[in-house]
Amino acid sequence: MKQKEAAKDLPLPCYETTGSSGMDLVACVEGEVLLKPGEVSLVPTGLFISLPLGYEAQVRPRSGLAAKHAVTVVNTPGTIDADYRGEVQVILGNVGKEPFTIRRGMRIAQMVIQKVIRANLVVVEELDGTARGAGGFGHTGMESKRW
């Protein structure tokens, strides 16, 4: 991991508790950025990472920002590929009704490192059958059938 010079005063990503699966990412902005309702902003972190092949970093929303302020990661989860070497940036969106202020050093997202399995796709004439079949969104209804 590398920090740009303008981010040297900011904390590196870390796990806040022993059970955390994500490391918090902080905003590397000059002063404050106002995120108006319905607005999307690309927020820099000041970080550059190098992942081994076979891994990715997923950028996910922080539940507190989403629940309390309706601020979320728009392309959730955002994917950082193993061969990407640019700055890690977070695409934040305000889906709420009130403006939200992003401040320097504010925890804005979390990053989870995951192993990637690459699939080998094979074209076939027919797929194997299942109980669900081709049933799409909502085809099982709203109530559990197991109770």
Image (cartoon, grey):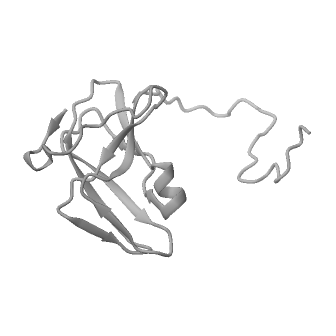
- Vertical order, 70 against 10 (above or below): below
- Vertical order, 71 against 9 (above or below): below
User: At x 54% / y 57%, what residue is drawn?
Assistant: 67
- Name, please, the residue furthest toward the right: 147
Residue 137, percent across and down? Answer: 71, 53
Closer to us: 30 or 95? 30
* Quadrant into which the N terminus falls: top left
Residue 15, percent across and down? Answer: 38, 32
Closer to us: 101 or 116? 101
- Vertical order, 74 against 97 (above or below): above
Quadrant housing residue 18? top left
Closer to us: 85 or 4? 4
User: At x 38% / y 48%, what residue is drawn?
Assistant: 109
Residue 135, percent across and down? Answer: 76, 47
Q: Viewed as shown, does residue 46 lie left or right of 21?
A: left
Residue 64, percent across and down? Answer: 49, 52
